[in-house]
Image (cartoon, rainbow, N blue to C red):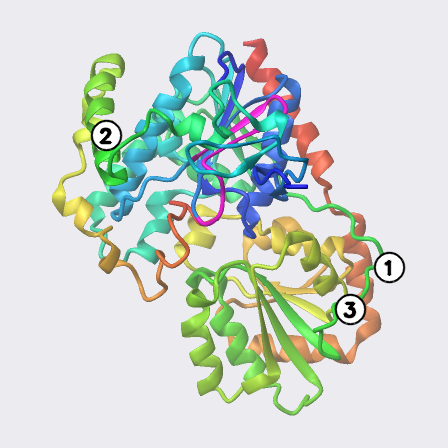
Amino acid sequence: MTPCTVTTGFFTLGKCGVMAVAGCPACGRALCANHVTEGGLCPECAAARNQVGHPAAAAAYRRRAHRHRTAQEYSDAGWYVGFDSYDRAAFDPGAGADQDYLDDGADALVDS
Amino acid sequence: MSEGHRAAYVAFDRFPSAKGSAVHIRHMAAELFERHGGGLLCVLGGGDLPAYQREGDVEIVRFTDVVPNLLDRAQAFTAWVAEQLAPHRDTLELCHVRDPWSALPVTGPMVYEANGLPSVELPYAWPMVAPSTLDKIRELEQDCLRRAAAVVVPSSVIGKAVIDRGAAPDRVHLIPNGADPVPASLPRPEAAPGRYLIYVGALQPWQGVDVLLRAFARLADLTDLHLVVCSSVSPNRARPLRRLAERLGLGDRVRWQYTLPHEQVAAWLAHAELSVAPLTAGPRNLEQGCNPIKVWESMAAGTPVVASDLPVIREVLGDDGRFVPPDRPAELARAIRVMLEYPDVTHEFAGRARRRVLTWSDVRHRLAAVYDQVESR
């Protein structure tokens, strides 16, 4: 039996493990009947199917689009354009304290 | 993705993880989703975590974009959250957030859970940040806290800090952290040394683990005593502290455990002689405040606690622990020695403390009351 390899669980994560009935055409992982989406993709690929291109480019696009959209919606353009390059420089990866905050990936702003 | 969630929980935190924040998110989000028939959880991804999950009526989406600069990443997260919330705009009744960048895209009723304030904590990790930048971040916090229908804080020190930032006092609700009862029969971890002190938690400078190592170096005559550091963060972050332990000649008397699953930490705590919470007297603990889950979990495990004498710890421990002046290794070493020499008195402390522990179920009841209040407005 080929088990379904979709990650499941809320706080404790594991693999689904139910008998697979298909494979995701995008990433190839085995899928059980519950985890095949309408288009035949796995849930992750289905959720991401509209997100293409380089991740950083996508993020920059989202930032620009969001600032543009919300500046009118919330009338608070200042919140989004208030940080200049001087502000940002202090948060470049090399500017962190000795305790490297990048070693385990994107981390919280507040560490409490 | 299906549409029409009535509730969303948004946090610029990786979830799940070994950190106390994840335990908190787990219980708070569970309460929110249980009363709204499911919901949308927007958190940070990374590692092996899937970008998308569906668990019954709960959808979990994780931000996975690679954005090296933290401020850029936070703003990209805001934009991403706005996209995630947009399809549910008409049905969302309540959003629960943990930080300003999660709060910015929320337009409807919002509960802001203030466990920490970036304007206070960020300089510890990013020492080059300018005061003018922190002022801007503080303005962001003020804007979000003023908009919140309710602000939930785990300690009265944070309560004061959020009121100083413009939160209406009648909207600030104190809900301390909790811990679930630990069964008395938990087996001793296989790797546990004979007699050991324990530190559980992350390793940021404000935790005072360096103070604990220096104190432990003064207990070299207690040759059968070990110190176990159960770090909730990766070995990379422990490097400076491990170097300090080597310089102090502590060698294998200090045992390091990394990112243990939460359920295993209880067994390590339960079999320790003492649990130490050596928090420092810096702005993060004195002005911002905190409510250390490590202290709650030690109390629940029936392990005596020795901790820094700070208002945030007094709030949790009451008089049922031993307090020492913060940042004083010699005082801490002396207190540990005294506690080890008088086990009867020490365990009396622990027994009293255990009876006072708030369970996560109690915490959820208090949060439910806040939700009731917000929804009745």
Residue B51 belongs to the span the image colors magenta: yes
As helix, strand or loop, the secondary structure at mark 2 comes to: helix
According to the picture, the residue beneath numbered tag 1 turns out to be B185
Task: Judge whether B323 appears above or below B328 on screen.
Answer: above
Relative image position of residue B64 (x, y in whole percent): 38, 40
Task: Judge whether B245 appears above or below B187 on screen.
Answer: below
Label 3, residues with CA under 10 Å away: few <14, some 14-19, many ≥20: many
Relative image position of residue B49 (x, y in whole percent): 49, 43
According to the picture, the residue beneath numbered tag 3 turns out to be B346
Q: Amino acid at mark 1?
A: Ser
Looking at this view, name the residue that lies furthest to the left.
A85
- Residue sitting nearer the eye, B131 or B74: B74
Label located before the other in sequence (3 or 1)? 1
CA separation, marks 3 and 2?
55 Å
Query: What chain is tagged by disc 3?
Result: B
As helix, strand or loop, the secondary structure at mark 1 comes to: loop
**Which quarter of the rendered picture does the C terminus of chain B lie within?**
top right
CA separation, marks 2 and 1?
52 Å
In this view, the mark in front (3 or 1):
1
Which residue is depicted at the point 64% across and 55% down? B295
Task: Judge whether B250 appears above or below B261 on screen.
Answer: below
Relative image position of residue B42 (x, y in whole percent): 46, 31
Looking at this view, name the residue that lies furthest to the top.
B90
Relative image position of residue B154 (x, y in whole percent): 56, 40
- Specify the segment rendered in magenta: B47-62
Q: Is residue B296 left or right of residue B282?
A: right
Quarter of the rendering containing residue B155: top right
Query: What chain is tagged by disc 1?
Result: B
According to the picture, the residue beneath numbered tag 2 turns out to be A63
Q: Amino acid at mark 2?
A: Arg
Q: Amino acid at mark 3?
A: Thr
Residue B107 in view of the camera: no
